[in-house]
Image: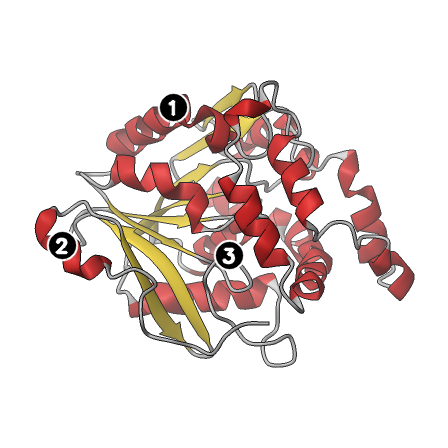
Amino acid sequence: MTSKASNTPIFNADALTAEGPHRIHYRFEKVNDANVFYREAGDPTAPTVLLLHGFAASSYMWRNVIEALADNYHVVAPDLPAFGYTEAPERSQYEYSFDNLTKTIDQFTDQLKLNRYAIAVHDYGAPVGWRLALAHPSKVTAIISQNGNAYEEGLSKGWEPIRKYWNDPTKENREALNDFPTPESIKWQYVEGVSDTSLVAPDAYILEGAQISRPGMADIQLDLLLDYASNVEQYPEFQAYFREYQPPLLAVWGKHDPFFLPPGAEAWKRDIPHADIRFYDTGHFALETHGDVIIPVIRQFLDDHLKI
C-alpha cells in the first residue's frame, strides 16, 4: 500500500529558512512504524496550533490556514496514517483504528516536543483531537472545529447504511459501502452542498482520489469507517471533557454538510455555554469555498484566547 519509510523531505524547505521565518516546511517524523509527513511554519516558541484533517483530505486542506497563522503562531499539520504523504504499514502490520491513529499522533507531538497546543479539527481529525484532549486535558489550549462532530445530533441520515455496517459488519454490508472510498465519492463530498462549485479547486479532490485508488487503500478506509462507531460510543466521554474543562471553542460549520448537520455544532452550547458557533452557506469542506471569511475568524479567535 505504501512505500518504505524515508527521512528525506519531499521538498527541501529547510534550505529556504534564511528567506523568512514564516516559510512552510515539509518534513517527515518517524513514529514507530509510521513515517509521518507534516507541514510546519512559524516560530516554535510561539503558541502552537495542531491541525488535524479528516477523511478525503490531508494536511493540504490547511494550506491557507497555515500561511495566515504563521506570523504569530507555531503551526503543525500532520497527515494521518493512510492519508496524504504519510508512509504507514499495511493493514496486517498496523491497526487502522481511531485509537491507534491517536496513539501515532500523540507520539508525534511528544517527539516534536509540542507540550501545549490548540487543536483545529475536521471530520476524522475530530475524534483524534477529542482523544488527545481526554488523555492530556492540560495540553489543549483551545479548540477549532470545522465540521468535526461530537454529538449524535450532528449525524445525518447519510450515516444509516454505515450504521447498518456497524451493527452487522458482514461482507455484504461492507460491500454495500464500496462506493464510499472512490474518487467519484470524494469529489462528491467536496462539491455537495456548494452553491457555486466553481469555487472548489479540483486539486484537493484529485489528489485524494489518487491516494484512495492506491492498492489496499479502499480496505483501510472501510476499516476506519467501521471503527467510526467507537467515536460515537465515546461521545458521552468527549462531552464530559467539554463540560469539565470548558476549553475555548470555535465551530466554523458548512451548514449543507451531507454528513454532519448544524445541530451537531449547536449542541456544544449545552456543554460550553460560551462556545462560538458560526455557520456558512457551503458544504463539508467549508475552507475550500469560504476560507476568505473563515480564516480571519479563526485568527481572531486564537488572538483572543491564546497569549501571543
Look at label 1 and name its amino acid. Answer: Asp
State yes or no: discs 3 and 1 in contact (Cβ < 8 Å): no
Q: Nearer the viewer, residue 221 or 182?
A: 182
N-terminal of the pair, mark 3 or mark 2, is: 2
Disc number lying in front (3 or 1):
1
Quarter of the rendering occupied by the C terminus: top left
Query: Is residue 98 toward the left or the right of residue 164 in the image?
Result: left
Residue position for label 2: 17
Look at label 3 and name its amino acid. Answer: Arg
For label 1, the SS is helix
Above or below, 266 against 140 in this view is above
State yes or no: discs 3 and 2 in contact (Cβ < 8 Å): no
Q: Residues within 10 Å of mark 2 (few under 14, many from 20)?
A: few
Q: Where residue 214 appears, x then y in whole percent?
A: 62, 64
Mark drawn on residue 264 = none
Q: For residue 293, which quarter of the picture? A: top left
Regarding residue 252, the answer to whether it shows in the image is: no
Q: Nearer the viewer, residue 135 or 206?
A: 206
Look at label 2 and name its amino acid. Answer: Thr
Residue at image x 22%, y 46%?
Answer: 47
N-terminal of the pair, mark 2 or mark 1, is: 2
N-terminal of the pair, mark 3 or mark 1, is: 3
Residue position for label 3: 131
Residue position for label 1: 292
